């Protein structure tokens, strides 16, 4: 008799080719529409599925995991970050968790540099002038920004993405500094031309641009709090393409309004779509709708990772991208 195919519930619509491949391999139920599942829909999904394919908008907390049916054995996340999943509770229930690391490293690093340039060179202000037909012609003193070559870039989190940002920053002539949970090997530091700071406070106080590239974990929540934000130089800017919760968003807003730092470029927010309305009113702030990984290539490769993780699990092996609490 043929082996029964795994029941896979996908909480959000994925690229068409990814959905087609999943459907070829498994008994797939797709989300009802291209919107986040409600709490009730998620509860129904965990009760019935063998595998749940989640994304960063799905909050898989202990309460939801407690409602899981006996068949749920894998949560295959479509994305690298798993801070929305209670991995420890899943492990206690015998539910594996996997993610899709590495495939959007370059995409996110590209967006980090784009935000650095957008803030320091005032690109959105120039764009707004042209779109509103208010441009009165070239002027020597109009929309003056700052040159990034020679500036100190501080990278908070020197994993795959942080290192990719460092390589790009080197090409722009920036001086690379970093703070990380663990110091990199000497040969890696030499390759990146990166200077390690054991003290985050000391690094923050000395850099011209601060790039947030660490994951959101209990230890990084509000790592850039009000006290640490105030250590930054008045002419410095901060860019975040990682997770909004790493920065105290209200404290950042107050500092920007007071002129405590020169600007910010944000692709992620502590409060999601309810991003601080005051931030949107500031001319020295560039806001993007979580576009860091939004390339056709990246989305397709994320889907392939999900499929490989589920297929490997279905074959009785450990998913190659399995997450365990000790990794967080």
Image: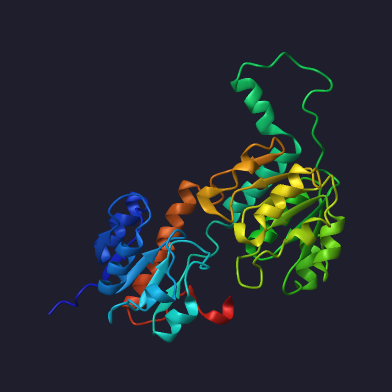
Front-lying residue, 110 or 246: 246
Q: How many marks?
A: 0
The percent position of residue 219, horizontal first and vertical second, equals 66, 73
- Rendered image quadrant of residue 40: bottom left
Quadrant in which residue 221 is drawn = bottom right
Residue at 30 percent across and 56 percent down: it is: 31
Residue 262, quarter of the rendered image: top right
- Please report the residue visible at 75 percent of the width from the left and 50 percent of the height from the top: 169
Residue 44, position as x, y percentages in the image: 27, 68
Give the left or right position of residue 129, taking residue 296 as reference. right
Look at the image and tell me in which quarter the C terminus lies: bottom right
Q: Is residue 79 left or right of residue 261?
A: left
**Residue name at image x 44 percent, y 83 percent:** 91
How far across and how far down the image is residue 246, in percent? 65, 61
The answer to which of 44 and 145 lies nearer the viewer is 44
* Location of the N terminus (image quadrant): bottom left
Task: Using residue 29 as the reference point, say whether residue 283 is left or right of it.
Answer: right
């Amino acid at each position: 008799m043929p082996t029964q195919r795994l029941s896979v519930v996908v909480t959000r619509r994925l690229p068409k080719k990814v959905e087609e491949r999943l459907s070829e391999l498994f008994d797939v139920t797709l989300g009802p529409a291209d919107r986040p599942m409600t709490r009730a829909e998620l509860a129904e999904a965990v009760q019935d599925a063998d595998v749940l394919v989640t994304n960063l908008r799905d909050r898989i907390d202990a309460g939801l995991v407690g409602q899981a049916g006996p068949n749920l054995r894998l949560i295959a996340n479509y994305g690298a970050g798993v801070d929305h999943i209670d991995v420890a509770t899943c492990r206690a229930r015998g539910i594996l968790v996997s993610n899709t690391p590495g495939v959007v490293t370059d995409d996110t690093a590209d967006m980090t540099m784009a935000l650095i340039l957008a803030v320091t060179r005032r690109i959105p202000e120039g764009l707004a002038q042209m779109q509103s037909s208010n441009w009165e012609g070239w002027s020597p003193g109009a929309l003056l920004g700052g040159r990034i070559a020679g500036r100190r870039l501080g990278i908070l989190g020197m994993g795959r993405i942080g290192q990719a940002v460092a390589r790009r920053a080197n090409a722009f002539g920036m001086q690379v500094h970093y703070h990380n949970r663990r110091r990199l090997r000497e040969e890696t530091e030499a390759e990146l031309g990166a200077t390690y700071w054991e003290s985050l406070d000391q690094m923050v106080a000395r850099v011209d641009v601060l790039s947030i590239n660490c994951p959101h974990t209990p230890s990084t929540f509000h790592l850039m709090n009000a006290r640490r934000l105030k250590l930054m130089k008045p002419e410095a800017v901060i860019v975040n393409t990682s997770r909004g919760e790493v920065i105290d968003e209200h404290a950042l807003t107050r500092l920007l309004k007071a002129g405590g730092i020169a600007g910010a470029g944000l692709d992620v927010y502590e409060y999601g779509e309810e991003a601080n309305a005051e931030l949107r009113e500031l001319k020295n702030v560039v806001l993007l709708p979580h576009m860091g990984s939004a390339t056709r290539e990246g989305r397709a490769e994320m889907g392939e990772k999900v499929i490989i993780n589920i297929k490997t699990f279905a074959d009785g092996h450990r998913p190659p991208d399995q997450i365990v609490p000790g990794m967080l």
